[in-house]
Amino acid sequence: MTSAIPVGDAYPYLRAASVGIRHHSRTLAPHGQHPASAADRVHLDVLHTHLTTLHQLIDQLAESTRPPHPAAGRQLATAHTRLWQATAAVHDAFHLLPVAETSSAGTDCQPERLPEGPPVLTICQRHLAAGHVVRRKTTPSDLNTPAPGHTTTCAQ
């Protein structure tokens, strides 16, 4: 059986992102005597960046798919909502982790004086910006609805 999607370099950056996530997942997995490492704030910030970018991509795909293929567009819109729920959970987890002790005594760099705020707030700025898009396109009841049982149309 052949795939309907060409395997070439149709989406090289998306493929590279997927490979990077798979590699990262494998490096986090426990190996023998080395237990899995716990997430830290930097890790969750990078993951949140990836999720919000993926959220934007799915939003664009849903918008362009909906007119010619309404059923597929609705499924992508549902994925858009579920991905936002995952993004919000990662954001919440970020704030539940302890802040790493950093000493900036004796240095000229004072990140709290940056115009965009301390680097720790970039996740909040990103989350708020993505949240504005979500609130324009999604109702609060949709955001609070648990994901229903997923049924697949693929032959197994």
Image: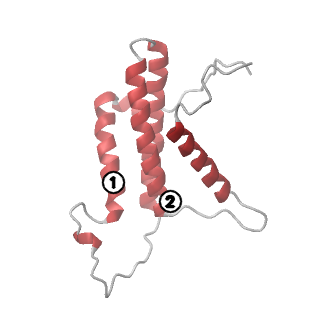
Q: Secondary structure at mark 1?
A: helix
Task: Give the residue at x 42% y 11%.
Answer: 68
Q: Are marks 2 and 1 in contact (CB under 8 Å)?
A: no
Say left or right for 132 vs 94: left
Residue at the bottom extreme, as displayed: 106
Q: Amino acid at mark 1?
A: Cys
Task: Give the residue at x 69% y 57%.
Answer: 29
**Residue position for label 2:** 43
Residue 72 marker: none
Q: Residues within 10 Å of mark 1 (few under 14, many from 20)?
A: some
Which quadrant would the C terminus be assigned to in this image?
top right
Position in image of residue 138 (x %, y %):
35, 29
N-terminal label among 2 and 1: 2
Q: Amino acid at mark 2?
A: His
Q: Is residue 89 above or below residue 45?
A: above
Say left or right for 114 vs 49: left
Position in image of residue 126 (x %, y %):
33, 49
Picture quarter containing residue 70? Answer: top left
Q: Is residue 84 visible?
A: no
Task: Give the residue at x 62% y 22%.
Answer: 151
**Residue position for label 1:** 124
Residue at the front extreme, as displayed: 8
Picture quarter containing residue 120? Answer: bottom left
Between 5 and 43, the residue placed more toward the observer is: 5
Q: Is residue 29 above or below residue 114?
A: above
Q: Secondary structure at mark 2?
A: helix
